[in-house]
Structures are given as structure tokens and as C-alpha cells.
Amino acid sequence: MSDFTGSFWDYYVGIITLVSIVACAVLLKTMSSRRVPGGTSETTGHTWDEDLGEFNNPLPRWWIWLFYITIVFGVVYLLLYPGLGSYAGSAKWTSKGEYEAEVKQANAQYGPLYEKYAAQDLKQVAADPQARAIGQKLFLNHCAQCHASDGGGSKGFPNLTDGDWLYGGDPETIKASIMNGRNGVMPPLGPVLGEAGTQDAANYVLSLSGRKHDPARAARGKEKFATICAACHGADGKGNQTLGAPNLTDNIWEYGGSEADILETITKGRGVNALTPGASAMPAHKDSLGEAKVHILAAYVYSLSNSQPVASPAR
Amino acid sequence: MNDSLKNRELRKADDLIEEALYEVREKIYPRAVGGWFAGWRVALVLATQIVFYGMPWLSWNARQAVLFDIAARKFYVFGLVLWPQDFIYLALLLVISALSLFLFTAVAGRLWCGYACPQTVYTEVFMWIERKVEGDRPLRIKLDRGPLGLKKLVLKAVKHGLWIALSLWTGFTFVGYFTPIGELAREVATLGLGPWESFWILFYGLATYGNAGWMREQVCIYMCPYARFQSAMFDTDTLVITYDGARGEPRGGRSRSTDPKAAGLGDCVDCGICVQVCPTGIDIRKGLQYECIGCAACIDGCNQVMEKMNYAPGLIRYSTENALREGWNFGQMAKRAFRPRVLAYTAILAVIVAAAGVSLALRVPLKVDVIRDRPSLAREVGGGAIENVYRLQIMNTEEIPHRYRIEAAGIPTLAIAGSDSVEVPAATTLMAPVRLRIEADEARPGSHRIEFRVKALDASRIEARERSTFVVR
């Protein structure tokens, strides 16, 4: 109703509705019989095409009562439910209330199931086919938009099936990642390293996982790496799960493993910063999903790289 | 000025009286009648109702043979399991029903109304109960006109008690098509019915009781749409229940020994039996009327009288407008049944029945829906290979589990990464994420048409193909 600042339209709608109802009742009353001159006639008196008449075949009396019943129904409805201007109705019905009642009912219905799993150890949940089936549904609804339906991820969104973990792959850490979200940030190092320095560092990073690289540049890059990159990625480049700094030696690339991709990663950084418009972080789900669902989700995500269920029954 | 004065005087002179456009219904007391057509009607009442009341109790493979499980959206009809995706068959069934109705109506008028319509059938059953309790027409009229005494009270209570019992059983049977009827019976016995089950049993029961006990012919006359548009299927060669006016008129009472010709009378003895037996209370001798539901009770009634009078039967009979006018015999009349309208209805009906039959016979108990992952169209994996991810919704519509092999074709080296077979339990839908991969530089950047093939490993005829696209960047 934000478009209407006054109560004028409430009264306008309400009065039109009430007048219409009364008018219908009056119309029914006056139209249930008619006055004809001089005794009953066999026809309704209407004539079409000069000589086509219509016999008066009266309908049964209960028929007109059906109309009156609809009027009574309408009045009762308008008293119970919102319909007359801003009058909310004595039944206090709202669409929001109905939605909340449905959620409450669903929670009451499925709550015990979630509670059962919430009390179990995550590895135990991951081994339960029914829990995995629920987990898959939750994953397809809440996670697959970024991490893909198979959990294989895509550029900028980690692959959850390969056993390589930014923050750690034990079940409790996975659960923490989903509950509280993650916001791993690679700072833009272009200005610090300079163009040549960036290329050197990139070639060193390429060499770490045995990819094609320029050995001379990589040698120069090694020094840069030790002073700047090692702080997060470690001296050996194997990363740091406390910070979410990826392992650079396993040939697994969240943002692409080509030289161009790595150059861009070093120059502009990754994660949410001024140079990476559209970048995103892993959001927290403890409020939107609640711990019980996250518990099952974490177990499902854990199962993706620790056993290989192709699919489980949807229903 | 002068004119309006005149008008006013005129109006005064006319005696204006109130005329109702609605009136209290006059109750009809159809008289019981026996005969050839009454026998047919009883046979059809029994046939339809044995099927209706009996069907839910049949079993098939350890489940109810006919069950419409709305909550699970599965519709079991003997060996067939229909899913919401099969709604085309419901549409076909309705089309076939409508066309059959058109065909029967064009050939022989309101056959459906007179013999098979639930309104007629339940009214017939309710009238049978009424007759057993209160007696035939004269007794019923006398009972209704008489004062309310103990006998009247008892008879009415017994009648309504029986009606209500039958109605509730009907409602129970109806709900038994949607909830397994054994379970439903247990719930009724333990007073554990759910709110919707209770509502529908009572609603359907009340509808049966109200329509067959109280409303009766009013449903046909005022409520039924088919009654009003069936005349569109009628023509002058349609079989209708007709009074042979040329033979019957002038009507009049006479003794059995009177020679009607000498007395200048037709064959109609004006006994009024045809009116008394009519469930809609019309006089068939006035000709074809929209109220006539084609039940042929008047034919049976009149033939009994004709027999008593030693006249030939068939003063009221199934005949056509043309046959009556031209005095055709049965053969000539029957020839006209093969007229273009009937042939057209028959041809269309035959085509649709054949199409529905073939479609059902060739129906593959497997449906596959391919949903592409949209947020990321393509992803590069180690060594420059490209992966696309899909969700395959695999519906096993058969009541045995199947293992399916998933294949994809359309681009060289296109292959499934990961497992390519999936087990789907009986009558279950399963969502399978599938990853397709091509090696580096196998296809130009852009969208490529591909096809998924899902085949049951244990039955070669069960195969579904579904098109999709593979995106290379």
C-alpha cells in the first residue's frame, strides 16, 4: 500500500464492494418475479427476430437460494478475511502467516530426522545413504550454483571432489567453512613486484607443479617468492590451510593454471578487492540454513572426495 | 401530455399481477415398470456398480490394482504406472469419452443418460430402495399426502437410513481409489481418518444422497450441460424415443372389446402409464423434449398396456424422425445409421483409440530430463580438457529397479567423467549429476549439439534419448 498515502482508496474499494453486494441482493429479489398485465402468460414476453418467443419455464425455487447463499458466503468471507479496504478480517489471515505455518509444519515433520543426524558424528552421517540423499538435495539447491551439480566447482569456485582443500578437508573444518563462510584473499601484488617481477614469480609458480616455464625467469622468481609469497603460501609453496592459501605444487588451480591466469592472479589478486569486480566469497550459512542442515551438507561434501556415490534416490 | 395520460390510464386498466420466475418443484413419483429396456437398465446398473464398488478391492503385484496416489503423484492402473508426465493419456481418455458420447448420441440419442450416467444409475438404486420401503407410486403419494404418524416416521427413517448408509459406502469407495482401501477401512474402524479423507467421504456421500435421493431429474434438467448441448448431435435420423402419433391418435379410453377403427379411435388408450413411469415427469406424446433422458421406461410401460389390449407393441418406440414420417421399416432406418455424421465420428474415434493404444504399447518406462548447469557453462580441467556438468533426472516408471548406462555422443572424444551407470529403484525419480569431458582442442569454442542416451542394462527396449548442448570456451 506504499503507493497510496491516504486511506481514501481503502474506503473507495470497501464501499464499492459493499454497495455491489447489496445491489446484487436487491437485483435478485426484484428479478425473482415480475408483474405482467392480465393473468399469467406462457412466454417471458421477450421477442427476437419478430416472432421468436421464449417460454417461461420457471426454475426451481432452490435455484435462487443458491444465489442468496453466495451472497451470505461473500459477506462471511469479507468478515473473516482481508478484502474490504484495509480491514484485515477477524480470522487474522495473512499470506506471511500461512507461509510461516507451513514452515513450522515442515520443521515439525522433518525436525526429528535432522535431529537424528545432528546427534551423529559427521563421518557416520557421511556413511548413511539416506543422509547423503538429503545432502545431495540440499547441495543441489544451495551449493551447486557455484560449486556445480557434481561439486566439481568452476573458475573461482573450488572443486570439492578432488581431495585438495584450501582450509582443510576433515569433516569439522568443512562444516566450519559452510557455517561461517570463508573469505580468502590474495592481495594484488602487481605494484609491488613490477611487470618483470610478476612474470618471474609466475614462472616460478609454474615450475612448482612441473608445468612448462622459463627456467631463467623461474630462478629469478624464486627469490621474489621467498620474500613476498612465502608468507602465506609457505617457503615450499605448499600453502597454509589456516589462511586458506592454496597449495601451488599440486597442479590444481582454482583460477586457472595457464601463465596468463597466474599473471592475472598475481597482478590483480583474488577474492573481493577493488581490482576484481564480481568476485565473491564463500557466504556463511548458519543463519540461512541452520546448523542441522549444514551438518548433513558437510557430511555430503566430505563424502564427495571420500567415497564415490554416483547418486542416491531423490524420492 | 395527452399521450402519457393515456398510457397511465391504460396501465391502470390492466390488472398487473405478480408472476413468479421461480417455483417450488413438484415431486415426481415414478411408477415401477418392468420389461425389455428396464432389464437392460438393471443389467447396466449392476455392471457399472460392481466395477465401481469392487475395483478398489482388487490387488495387483502386492498393491492395490487401481490406485491414484496423488501425494506421490503416481497413478496405478493394473500393470501400468502413470506419472504426471503421462497426463496426455488422461486427455486422450477424455477425448475418447467425449467422442464416444457424440457417436452414441448421433446414432441413438441419450443412451448414456438413460442407462449408464451415474445420476441415472444412483437414482435407479435409490428408487429401488424407496420402492422396497414405501411401496410403489400410489402408496408413496398416499404416504406423502397423509399426516405424520408413527408409520410414516418409521418408513421415512428407514428409507433415509438406507440411503445414507449406501451414500457413505459410496463415498468410502470413492476415497478408496485415492487412499489404499484396506488402510482406509482400518482407519474408519479405529476412527483414525485424516481430515481430507473424512471430508471427501462425507462430501461424496452427501453428493450421492442429495443428487440421487432429492435432486434426481433436476440434475438432468437444470444442471447437466450435456443435456443442453446434446441436441447439437441429433439429426432427423437419430434414434429417439417416439410416440407414433399417426397410429395412436385420436387417443381415448375404450374397453378391450371395442374395435378402435369403428369407434374412430387410435391405438392410444390414454391410460397415462407413460407419464406415470417417466422419471422426469414429461408426457412423451407431446414429442421429443429436452427433459427426456431416453430411459425407455415409457416404452416398457406402453408395451405392457398394448399387450393387455391385444394391440401390436411399439406405439412408443425407438424410431427416427424420418422413419416415423416416411413409415420406414427397421432395415430402412438402420441403413441411415451409416450417414456421414456417424461415419465421421466413428473414423475420428477409431483414429484416436488406435493412436492411444499404439502410444501405450510403445511407451518406454523411462523418462530422462537433462538440465544443464547454468552458472558455469564450461570449465577447464587439467591438461586443457573441457568439462560441462548436467543434472540428469532419471525416472524409472516401472515397478522393478533398473541399472542404466548413460552415454553421450555428438563430439569426438566426448565421454562421461566418473561413473557412467546408475541404479534407479522401482518407480522412483533420481537426480544424477553427470560430468561430460572432451580433450583439449577437440571442438571449436561455442555451443555444440549433443545427445544423451540412457539405456537399461537388463532390457534393450528401454532407452531414452535427450538432446542437450556442450559448451566449449
Image (cartoon, grey):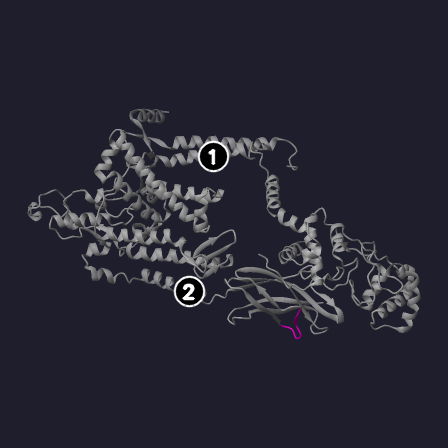
Q: Amino acid at mark 1?
A: Phe
Numbered label attached to residue B357: 2
Residue B434 image point, x, y percent: 64, 65
Relative side of B51 to B397, left or right: left
Q: Is residue B184 magenta?
A: no
**Dot 2: what SS?**
helix
- What residue did someone put label 1 on? A73
Who is closer to the viewer here, B158 or B386? B158
Magenta extent:
B410-417
Residue A113 left/right relative to B92: right
- Horizontal arrangement in the rendering, residue A111 relative to residue A207 (left or right): left
Q: Does label 2 lie on the same chain as label 1? A: no
Q: What x and y, as percent, mark residue A303?
A: 69, 60
Camera-side mark, 1 or 2: 2
Position of A148 with respect to B71 (left or right) is right
Q: Give the position of the C terminus of chain A as an image quadrant.
A: bottom right
Q: Is residue A69 above or below residue A191?
A: above
Residue displayed at 74% across by 50% down: A179
